[in-house]
């Protein structure tokens, strides 16, 4: 029976070598694989094209585009047509001389139609400032969309790697149960021939029960990660291929990463455009203090004038200019200007906050990436040492120099080391994507995703100079 321990050891090593290879594939390059949904790039492609939150943000940008068209309306004339008609009964009694009166009464059907056109010539620069303000709002919305794209891609990469990690850990725990079952069988055989005590059997049973509990926990984690994958990616996962880091797209040094992150992170650039919006809002508010100049042309034709029986037909045509100079309007306009200035100050502080936050995120992501790299080396060494230690403990237990508990402890240490290695490999990939996101470069163009890139400028130019129409460019 003593020889069984050596046989189990060899079989166990063969099993665990296969498991170790499973975990290490996380860091193997996968760019040579075709881009389908079960590769990391395929998952990112699918998330970019179908994620509902990202599509919602794209719709929000399209809605913001309309602000420019609305602002440009201030340059265009306003035209209105009116028509009035109906039936009326009139009776008029007129004094001609003392004691002499004339009465006029009857029915008629008056009708009037007219058209009026008004063109603003000067409005205190409010229209051009509103136009620039709307254009800055569009730019800010695009940066917000870019930030949403980065968030979706990072969430997709994280969900993919989490599922890959939890799948590998579940396989590790299941194989661990198989080894513990073999260990328990051998311990019982040795107990039957009197080589070990009932305590050794109980220890093996306890460790097997713990292993089964760890399998249940791993299954729960796998199920949770699978649900997250479905929510972020938009499809059920299949057999996941290996993931790969994206360090090559990030700056080489921490200083460069901070410089790029504080300048190009979409949260920072969006805050910069919001400052521009606030500055132009101040100018728009100040425009209420300027005079306005407009010209109005009108034409009206009447048949059977309202309120008269003896007028059959008339018309009225005019072209008038109007100059309005505000003197005092209750003080509301001054309050609006002060309010806009305070909002501008707030937006400038928001920009400072965004830059500080971007810097913090870059430093944090850089530290996590460096730690993940070092952790992989450490856990790989830990796995190798644990394998050697387990084989040695088993050999020593075979000749009676070690107990069953020593073997079980060495086995658990090896399991823990391999779980740590799989987690470190997952952290390595996710940290590289996180760093790329903090510097503002996590985009389908940089990653080389085979997916049509959403261009917000297309819709903008479709609606910017539109004078009329109810349908959106996509036909709705």
Image (cartoon, rainbow, N blue to C red):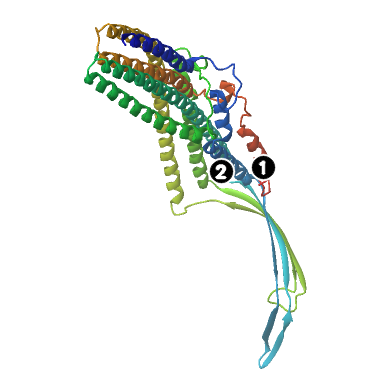
Look at the picture and state if 257 lies above or below 231: above
Question: Which residue is label 1 attached to?
Answer: 474
Quadrant position of residue 314: bottom right
Which mark's residue is nearer the viewer, 2 or 1?
Answer: 1
The quadrant of the picture occupied by the N terminus is: top left
Gap in Å between the C-alphas at discs 2 and 1?
32 Å
Query: Does residue 166 show up?
Result: yes
Q: Position of residue 247 (x, y in %)?
A: 49, 15
Q: Is residue 48 left or right of residue 200?
A: right
Q: Determine the secondary structure under disc 1.
A: loop
Q: Which mark is residue 389?
A: none
Q: Determine the secondary structure under disc 2.
A: helix
Question: Which residue is label 2 attached to?
Answer: 126
The residue under the point 51% across, 18% down is: 244
| Nearer to the camera, 453 or 296 | 453
In this view, which residue lies farthest toward the bottom?
99
The residue carrying pointer 1 sits among few (fewer than 14), some (14 to 19) or many (20 or more) residues within 10 Å by Cα, namely: few
| Nearer to the camera, 149 or 273 | 149
The residue under the point 38% across, 10% down is: 7
Q: Position of residue 312 (x, y in %)?
A: 77, 74
Query: Does residue 258 show up?
Result: no
Look at the picture and state if 175 lies above or below 117: above
Look at the picture and state if 108 lies above or below 423: below
């Amino acid at each position: 029976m003593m020889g069984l321990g050596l046989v189990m050891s060899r079989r166990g090593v063969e099993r665990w070598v296969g498991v170790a290879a499973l975990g290490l594939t996380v860091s193997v390059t996968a760019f040579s694989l075709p881009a389908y949904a079960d590769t990391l790039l395929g998952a990112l492609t699918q998330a970019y094209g179908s994620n509902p939150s990202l599509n919602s943000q794209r719709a929000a940008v399209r809605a913001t585009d309309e602000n420019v068209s609305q602002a440009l309306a201030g340059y265009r004339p306003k035209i209105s047509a009116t028509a009035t008609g109906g039936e009326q009964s009139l009776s008029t009694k007129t004094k001609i001389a003392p004691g002499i009166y004339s009465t006029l009464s009857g029915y008629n059907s008056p009708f009037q139609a007219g058209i009026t056109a008004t063109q603003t010539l000067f409005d205190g620069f409010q229209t051009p400032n509103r136009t620039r303000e709307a254009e800055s709002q569009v730019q800010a919305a695009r940066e917000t969309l870019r930030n949403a794209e980065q968030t979706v891609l990072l969430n997709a990469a994280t969900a993919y790697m989490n599922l890959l990690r939890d799948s590998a850990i579940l396989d590790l725990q299941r194989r661990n149960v198989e080894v513990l079952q073999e260990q328990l069988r051998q311990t019982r055989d040795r107990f039957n021939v009197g080589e070990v005590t009932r305590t050794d059997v109980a220890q093996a049973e306890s460790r097997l029960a713990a292993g089964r509990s760890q399998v249940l926990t791993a299954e729960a984690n796998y199920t949770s990660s699978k649900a997250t994958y479905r929510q972020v990616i938009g499809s059920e996962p299949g057999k996941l291929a290996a993931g790969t880091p994206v360090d090559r797209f990030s700056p080489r040094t921490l200083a460069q990463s901070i410089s790029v992150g504080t300048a190009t992170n979409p949260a920072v650039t969006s805050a910069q455009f919001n400052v521009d919006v606030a500055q132009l809002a101040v100018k728009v508010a100040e425009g209420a203090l300027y005079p306005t100049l407009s010209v109005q042309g009108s034409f009206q034709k009447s048949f059977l004038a309202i309120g008269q029986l003896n007028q059959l037909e008339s018309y009225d045509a005019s072209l008038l200019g109007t100059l309005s100079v505000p003197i005092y309007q209750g003080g509301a306009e001054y309050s609006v200007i002060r309010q806009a200035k305070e909002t501008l100050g707030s937006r400038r502080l928001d920009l400072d906050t965004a830059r500080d936050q971007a810097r913090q995120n870059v430093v944090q992501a850089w530290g996590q990436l460096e730690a993940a790299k070092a952790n992989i080396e450490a856990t790989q060494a830990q796995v190798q040492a644990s394998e050697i230690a387990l084989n040695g403990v088993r050999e020593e237990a075979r000749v009676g120099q070690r107990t069953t508990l020593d073997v079980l402890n060495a086995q658990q240490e090896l399991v823990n080391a391999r779980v740590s290695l799989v987690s470190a490999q997952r952290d390595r990939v996710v940290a590289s994507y996180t760093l790329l996101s903090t510097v503002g470069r996590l985009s389908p163009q940089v990653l080389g995703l085979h997916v049509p890139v959403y261009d917000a400028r297309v819709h903008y130019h479709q609606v910017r100079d539109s004078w009329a129409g109810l349908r959106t460019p996509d036909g709705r």
